[in-house]
Amino acid sequence: MLKQPCSGSSVSRLSALFCLLLVFSGCSSMYYSTMEKLGVEKRDILVDRVGDARDSQSDARETFRSSLERFQSVVDTPETGLQEKYDVISDAYDKSLKSANKVRDRIEAVEDVSGALFDEWEDELDLYESASLRKTSKRRLDETRELYNSLIARMHQVEKRMDPVLEAFEDQVLFLKHNLNAQAIGSLEEELGQIRQDVDSLVHDMEVSIAESEAFIQRFREGSV
């Protein structure tokens, strides 16, 4: 008997309850097996994790925008004390780094379940007695994998775009930490133009990735893949 698919919210709740299996066993297959017994298929988990990755990118987009504004504020407020300026950009960098790491973790989780799903789907093609049904399933597998490959490529592009921004933020924090003077603030002002361009490129890639994630989720929920 086919199991009734769970809604996205149900998957999230069940995932929260049983994620400790993955942590303590270090075995994804055990986690997926347990979830399947509860009626949660790998497809459901994939959709849920793509949603998590989308949300983490949306949060990161706002964090990076806010961090850029805070770096700009340090340059624009000459009356602010140097130590306070350092604290502002140090905190902005820390929040950006934490947000970026969350994005990376969410992408890794998507890749983990997608690999398990596609391997299982591929193996099950050999179980069909009907050549027609096997052909149809193989076509849908290929379509889904193509859609997924485009999505994960977008997500990795976001990962790469985060690096130069984080590196620039870190450079300014380190430099100001050891050169707490007006000259250091001047160097930050000189770098802000490039940093702003990098943030703008990152935000654009995030928005494209977010939109593609939403389209991916919608197609899965509609059953078109």
Image (cartoon, rainbow, N blue to C red):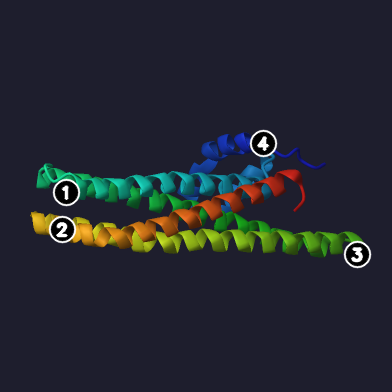
- Residue 41 location in percent, x, y? 68, 46
Mark 3, other Cα within 10 Å: few <14 / some 14–19 / many ≥20: few
> Secondary structure beneath disc 3?
helix
Name the residue type under label 3.
Ala
Q: CA distance from mark 2 to mark 4?
A: 53 Å
Which is more N-terminal, label 4 or label 3? 4
Which mark's residue is nearer the viewer, 1 or 2?
A: 2
Query: In terms of depth relative to the viewer, which is nearer, 202 or 140?
Result: 202
- Residue 196 location in percent, x, y? 34, 57
- Residue 174 location in percent, x, y? 18, 59
Which is more N-terminal, label 3 or label 2? 3
Which is more N-terminal, label 1 or label 3? 1
Q: Which residue is mark 4?
A: 7
Residue 86, labelled with which disc? Answer: 1
Q: Residue at x 13, y 58 (%)?
A: 184
Name the residue type under label 2.
Gly
